[in-house]
Image: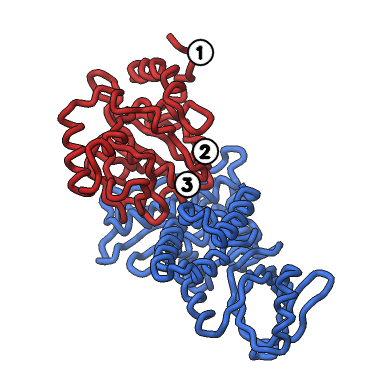
Amino acid sequence: MSPNQIEFKITKDSSAQNVDLDNMSIEASAAFVVLLNSMNNILKYYNSNNEIKVKLVKGSAAINVVSTENIISTIESDFEDVLGNKSGNQILVENWREIQKVLSSDGLEYEAKFAYTNKPPSSSLVTRLRTSNQIRLRKTEYIFTGIEFLTGKLIEVGGKTPNIHILDQFDNKIKIGCTEGNAKVARRYLYEPLYVSAFCRTKDNFPNLYWFCDVYNDGVMMNELNALYNRIFTTDSVVGQLINIHDIGKEVLEKDPSYIMMRRFMKMFDYEYVDYRYMKSLMVLTKGIKNHGELGGIREKIVEKYNKRN
Amino acid sequence: MNLMLIDESEIVPINSTTLPSKFVAAAVELDPNTRKAKHSGIVMKHDSTYKLFHFDGRLWFDDAPVNNWYFHKRLDFIKEEEIENFIAHCEIIKKESNPRYGFYYPGSHYDSTGQYFSKIPNTEFMTCVGLCLNTIKGFIEDDEYFRYTDWTIADNHMTMSFITDTIIGIRAANPTLSNVQIMEDIRRILPDEYFASTYLKTMPIRKHEIDVIIDAVRIALINKT
């Protein structure tokens, strides 16, 4: 009779050898640690009464999370929400996503399921996680998703709350919030082609919110800045992204002593919803030029926003 | 003795289970016989792992060893939320810098590009404490971390041969400097002075403030088992 439990097992390594806790390859142990860590983080959310036990099973590389039928059912039900991208719980989503990444990667073979004493087990979690799109958080409030680089014709400027409207190549009208100063400058370019970047925030079933970041002379310059921005995200690791900010910033500073590109690069961090860690990296990067007139001014605005967040 | 001056319980081993999940802290290595601080570094905890950044003539950024290393509570001015930034800062310095050993500190720092900023060029000479000061100063917003001029060539019993080696090394890197110019910035801030500085609440760190608590810190380290 099976206890009520969640079972994860690494069955074979990449050379098709059985995996045992006593004898794991580096890749198997790395996967095992991620599974254990992520599961622990998930369980912290439920374990209010010390009713959940985690067992590491020898003779294989297995993690069994044992509890009452009620708790295992609740975890399974929440898992269904997470898998359907219906969960707004960041801890659950992030940790199930880590598990999804591990189970979906090539090399190792796994078994995973919810098992019950008095009812049939779930279908294989491995198959379901592998065949699903990447798990993501249901957005119940606006979340900053990054900078978008937009091309179109400027068709409207103004409003009580200042904004500009551009018509993109697909005839979509995009409204971008901005300062009064930005709007006054933009008015000169009415009905002209425009190359702009905007900070974007999104929420499920609501239109995107944009806030003006920068305007470029032409598409070439815009694409150059777009490429620099994308380079930050060539790794999933936050530390890696912060090192990328350093590498890009250093390259920009060295290539362009007039600081034109640096000014534009810095502007990409001057927004209250930008990840504060990116802001901090930029602050450290530019500490040596904080007394530079124009760059110092942009830096000061970023420092102000950073201090408000922390 | 001196219990009123510092809270000894804040000096804890690297593997203590009572610590928060993320922090950056000053670390010292103790001589196993004398229990005196003989070496220093910066320890950080993130994702359940401890990393130690230190310099002994070679720059290291590895998993922190447990034996004989103690650290103080988190460096309060580096926030828990900044841990990834600090790790990235150390990674970059490790990759980009080229320090050499010498009793020299001219108020310099490493910026986020790993570049060594000094009022005097081509003088990337430092001790283990120097690396810590250069690293931390480059990370914080303040322009001044230690009031380094509080320490002079007359302090801390540097041997003449070490001083001479430092001067020869710096002159080889920057022949335009005279011996006198170099000697102005020959100084040695001791590992336990750097460690004691974590008890002080205001910047810049002043030597006379460290002098008040240094004996209490030394006794606390001796008493740690």
Q: Which mark is residue B83?
A: 3
What amino acid type should be assigned to the residue bearing mark 1? Met
Mark 3 belongs to chain: B
Q: What element carries label 2?
A: loop
The answer to whether marks 1 and 2 mark residues whose Cβ atoms lie closer than 8 Å is: no
- Disc 3 crowd rating (10 Å Cα; few below 14, some 14-19, many 20+) is some
**Pointer 2 chain:** B
Residue corresponding to mark 2: B77
Letter of the chain shown blue in the rendering = A
Residue B48 x %, y %? 42, 44
| Amino acid carrying mark 3 in the image | Ile
Position of B31 relative to A22 (above/below): above
Nearer the camera: disc 1 or disc 3: 1
- Any mark on residue B4, and which? 1
Where disc 3 sits, the SS reads: helix
In this rendering, would A238 be left or right of A143? left
Q: In this view, does B114 lie to the left or right of A117?
A: left
In the rendered image of this protein, which colour is used for chain B?
red
Q: Which amino acid does label 2 sit on?
A: Phe
